[in-house]
Amino acid sequence: MAARPDAASRGRLAVDLAAVLAAARRDQARVRLLPSRPAGDDVLLALTSDAAPRAASEGIAAWPCVLKWSAAALREGLRDRVARGRRSFWQEMYLELRRLAGNESWPARVREALRRWMQHASARMSPRVPLSSTTFPRRLLREPVPVRLPAALEQQARREAAAAGITADGHVVTLEIGTRIEPFLDAIGFLEASGYTVVRIGEPAAARVRHRRVIDLAGDAQQTRLLELHVLLRSAFLICESVEVQRLACLAGTPCLLVNAADAVVSYPVRSSGLFTLKTPVDLDTGELLSVEDMLTERYYRNRRNYGFRETTAVELLAAVREMHDARGRHTAETAPQARFRARATAAAQGLAARVPQLAEWGADEGFLGDGRLAAVQAERVS
Amino acid sequence: MSRVLFVMLHPGFIRYYEPALHAMASAGHDVHVAFEVTRSKLREDAAASRLAAASPRITCGATPPRPESVRLFLERSDRSALRSGAVPATRGDARVEAWESLATTVRLMGDFLRYFEPAFERASSLRDRAEKRLPRLHARIVRLAAGAGASARTTLSAVLRFVEQVIPANPAVVAFLREQRPDLLLVTPLIELGSQQVDYIKAARQTGVRSALAVASWDNLTNKGLVRVVPDHVIVWNEAQKAEAIALHDVPAGRVEVTGAQVFDHWFEARPSRSRDEFCRAVGLDPSRPFLLYVGSSTFIAPDEVPFFTRWLSRLRADADAAVSTAGVLVRPHPANSRQWRAFEAAAFSNVAVWPRIGTDFNDTDFRRDFFDSLYYCAAVVGINTSALLEAGIVGRPVFTVTVPEFAHSQDGTLHFQHLVHGDSGLVRAAASLDEHVAQLSAALAGEGGVAERDRAFVGSFIRPLGLDRPAAPVFARTVETLASLPRPDAAPEAWTVRAARTALRPLASLARTLAEDRPLWVYAARPLLNGAVRLWAAAASARDALRGSVHLGRKRSRRQLQRAWYEWTRQARHRARRANKQAARLVRGLGSAARRVGRRQL
């Protein structure tokens, strides 16, 4: 099975890699990764899996595959261009017909016919499915494919981890924070009390964490992509604020708690080990707070610039982290509100996919949004 | 006494000149302020009413309406706008509209082109903003020329300047100027992207009126458009702006007048309206702790300011220095960018307040007083890039900023920011990281690192270059008075070459109007065919309708005629029958009487 993962971002690359590994396992095929443009994250691309072994990606042996891929890519590119051209044509026709239909000096019959054609053009200018075929294969990613670093990189990563003070035997929780550390402090205290070593990765935007059992790699010279991935691979679970990192965890097979998500559909965890919390949107015109249900409406997706957000509170964060810790390594049944929210989110994802491009790309996959859940503390607010 | 016509884009510009206008009116000059567009976003229209009510010598009104505006030009390319096939009312209107479209096109192209000059190398956001206003085809032409090197850029610039010279001033503007007959025409801001105020300068030349550009604010000459047609005079705040006018807008040095920043005069005399304790209690801060004032920036400078502020505050609260971590923080949102602060929950932090309340009237007298109190009682001021930093400097508070990647476009990416942070003479202490910034704040809260003399020198050179004790508004008013008293320049008749070139460029004007729609080129090619087909169809439909109508009418008439004929015939028949009946009856009666007579004779 050949693939050229999209390396535009780390998250996208992680999803593509996870998908190709899952597809190869399903088809019992070997994976041949063709070089990405632009060049992707070398460490991610180096990941291997026993369930989907890698085939050589370079040299003469890879040529037929590269040629076949190039031909297919060319064909798809052409198809894409034609589709875009057709869409553009109907859009322009729609505008022209609308202009002509506005001329009141013409007979009513002509204007009515022009309006009918306008509707016809309008129906053709918005495709029912996205032009690109980069939908999020949620069904395929439902079960993780175990991945590991090649031996040499693993050795190097262990050395880097030891240098950073991460012991080989401890239970690790990885933490990635966007802006503020304060709401996480209680949760960090709980994790410390539960015997975890918390390793913070990511950007150094928020202040440094000064706790006895917290290793803050954010912005540190010791933080490398390899060390980040190594920590992620061996973590009991990940707490993150970025969807990109959530997708990285999806590839690594690490259970993930995504906090402060602004989108209930796109961020919905695929696997049953996944949990997430939502920010609270604020209508910037009125100052009113939106409910969790409001986040599943078309109005919300269409007016995103009209909303500001309030972060998940420290109390809710602590509850979500507890839930994550309690669910670790065992299957826990989801609560009725959680099930209700999943049903609503899935219905919204399906209903809005035709009208919201973002949901067409990252929403439900043939009616499946994910086995994950909204943190119980927030799900209780869903009526 | 002289008569001054002051053309402003909208009433929001009044606040920059209000004291100066009062000073001019007090000196006995008549001032008419004309606004191109109305604006009520921040209740600017109230400022116009207040100004007009202040003195009988000041009047306010609108400029003459124009068939085309930059807004309309931009709306035409808006694909989501609902518009019908409306066409200009008359042939004359269509011509004026076409010239104005060409003018806007040429000006927007020139404005976009300027951001490829070496001085604007890092101004990517300003460049993008200018590009967004242009139809894609025109943007592509400018990018092509800009990419081809300095000579191509110069050539395109020369072509645009030539076309600008050929474009006639709007006839309504010329008529307006003739009607007003001012001794001096003042225009502000003139440098908006694609500004139509250029026509006032052209019309002033044409009618022999002295003209001057009043530069409203410190960022005007570097982050907007070009002064396309140089007026007789340019009034600026300081020597730095004078240098910008000369270097970036080709204004001859002799035409530039430096008057100081009249908009800030009131800060020099202002006094706090209450005690520090009262103020802190009113806003909800702990009076026993010093507080930092965070001043918000405009939408363009800081579109997403709240996440940065939250991060900044988080860093402050986590600092080892208790003076920093426990200091109060007062947020003063930018009046035009306050909406986003509704998402910020000050109650989630200790000793933090947002003030004034979001939605407070910007024109309220308390608004300025409260802001002064905030500046006066704070220990230091922090902001991204805003005029409030200058105001803090005037009040004598240390001013800080931190350069962060999310605001690179509005800090290092703008030229006016460099005035604030310029080497050792800048007003604002800029830090390259949050850690460095917090260390600076820590020193400021401890009363160390004072550079009051340097700040004073900056205020002296940037705000009041003619002397710290000399208010700028009277200087501005006197400068205007002097300019208005100068002899009128001769009216400049148009050369025959310009008129000839105008005739040649007329098709270009029509083309500019069409191309402003920003459609793919095939649409313009297909449009005549489509228009023709629909016209033919409409004509055929009309003819068929007319024919149907006439046949229907004919049938109706025939039916009516038949009905009438039948009616007439039956009426006559009835009439005849009646007459025949009468005659028969008469005959019967005659026969009867004859019979009776015969009978009597026989008896």
Image (spheres, coloured by chain):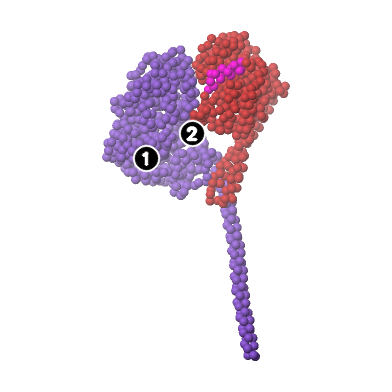
Chain colours: A red, B purple
* Magenta stretch: includes residue B164: no
The structure residue drawn at horizontal position 34% and vertical position 23%, both measured from the top left corner, is B274
Q: Is residue A78 visible?
A: no
Q: Give how far apart the Cα atoms at labels 2 and 1 are.
A: 29 Å
Disc 2 marks which residue? Answer: B131
The structure residue drawn at horizontal position 62% and vertical position 33%, both measured from the top left corner, is A351
Q: In the displayed structure, does residue A338 sit left or right of residue B259?
A: right
Same chain letter for marks 2 and 1? yes
Q: Amino acid at mark 2?
A: Glu
B334 vs B34, nearest the viewer: B334
A4 vs B311, nearest the viewer: B311
Crowd around label 2: few <14 · some 14–19 · many ≥20 (10 Å): many
* Residue A136 locus on image (x, y percent): 63, 27
Q: Magenta region: which residues? A: A311-325
The N terminus of chain B is located in which quarter? top left
SS of the residue at dot 1? strand
Counting residues from the start of the chain, the first of labels 2 and 1 encountered is 1
The structure residue drawn at horizontal position 44% and vertical position 24%, both measured from the top left corner, is B354
The C terminus of chain B is located in which quarter? bottom right
* Residue A297 locus on image (x, y percent): 58, 31
A105, above or below B328, in the image: below
Q: In the displayed structure, does residue B117 sit left or right of residue A159?
A: left
Q: Amino acid at mark 1?
A: Ala
* Residue A318 locus on image (x, y percent): 56, 17
Q: Is residue B284 visible?
A: yes
The nearer-to-camera label among 2 and 1 is: 1
Please identify the residue farthest to the front as the structure is shown. Answer: B603
